[in-house]
Image (cartoon, rainbow, N blue to C red):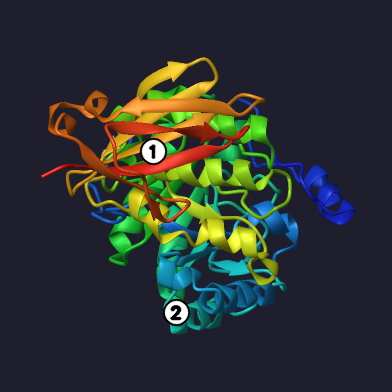
Amino acid sequence: MTQLRTVRFSAALFAMVSSCTLSATSAPTNVPAVSPVPANKLAPTPPMGWNSWNHFAGRITASDVRAMADAMVATGMRDAGYVYVNIDDTWVGERDATGAIRPNAKFGDMSALAAYVHARGLKLGLYSSPGAKTCAGFAGSHGHEDQDARTYAAWGVDFLKYDYCGARDQYPVTRENQEALFRRMGHALRQTGRPIVYSLSQSGDFDIWRWAPQTGANMWRTTPDISDDWASMSKRGFRQLDLGAWSRPGHWNDPDMLEIGNGGMTADEYRTQMSLWSILPAPLLAGNDLRSMDAVTKEILLNREVIAVDQDPAGTPARRLETRGDLEVLVRDMSDGSIVVGFFNRGERTAEVNLAWRRLGDRFRQGATARDLWRHAAVAPGSGYAGSVPRHGVVLLRVTPAT
């Protein structure tokens, strides 16, 4: 289950969360079984966009969301494929007399906010929980799944992040209970008739990748919350290589959001995150302040050649070609017949690398052409590649067999 996030909470918000009590019974019971949810045929490639939590946490407002939407257009992020503008926890207010959910004073008219986002060629995402409360203590969707789904659809919502966090105090913590609660909302979203990408968040418990597709989900968190540091990012990213069999178009493993631009890692480490998430492939949800990106952050997030790897329509997962000490050599088959090769240096010193093209398969025995996706330049002709990879850095190549 997703941990209660501790980053950047204000004292007032912390006090509010601490004082909240869930409407749990003294003797929790299991959730009744719910039938599988058919696939919604959305997210044929990993969703791309922005999420409010990593930078704003509980401070996010409608004004901030409008500003991020404007920045996504102005910086070229929308045109590069980032289309979802996702509001995380703390947007919810109270339910009205009919039980309908309402936004709090920070957000006001959600239909108007959705219209603002849509007018810029973008899509709006929201956050909720199958519990009575969200992680931050706001009203969850428990007992109101159908009603909330209809409300989201009426507002014009295009994406729902559904976080199990708040439900853990209401029911025994079992896979069956989690699956049933996620299926409830999956059915509710489907019944609205609106295309809403469905994203599950619960830290990868109970091997969620094995059963999440039957909830109607398009993506599911496979890890606890990410932090803006090398250890957190690399642990979560490389863990995905063991889960590739459960990732495919419409259904994506999610190692959490991008930290690029938040300041806790070096440029090489941020290039590693962008490269690793793309070669896996994984959703690309930026989590920085888009209004104040420096040139390096823009160069990383807007690298069209790397984004094209992530968005390749085949959706083939990456695999390890080999591990050499601290060096991981990952490869991924692309729909055009090329292979993307990533040399990832997890060590503390520069690593020297070399790879003969024939190692990529029989199609490459007659040679190949290669392009460095970060240098945006052709690799020198030859029978393979030799070079160096900086500490915590990456070299990402797209290799095409000779004709």
Is 379 in front, or is 331? 379
Residue found at x 52% / y 83%: 116
Residue 62 point in image, percent of width and height: 65, 74
Residue under label 2, please give it: 118
Circle number at residue 280 = 1
Residue found at x 65% / y 26%: 349
Residue 26 point in image, percent of width and height: 65, 28
Number of numbered discs visible in the structure rendering: 2
- Where residue 307 sits, quadrant-wise, is bottom left
- For disc 1, the neighbor class at 10 Å (few under 14, some 14 to 19, many from 20) is many
Q: Give the amino acid type for the residue marked by disc 2 in the picture.
A: His
Residue 1 seen in render? no
Q: Residue 40, relative to residue 385: is it above or below?
A: below
Residue 20 point in image, percent of width and height: 76, 46
Q: Earlier in the sequence, mark 1 or mark 2?
A: 2
Taking 169 as reference, is 209 left or right?
A: left
Helix or strand or loop: what does disc 1 sit on?
loop
Residue found at x 68% / y 69%: 104
Helix or strand or loop: what does disc 2 sit on?
helix
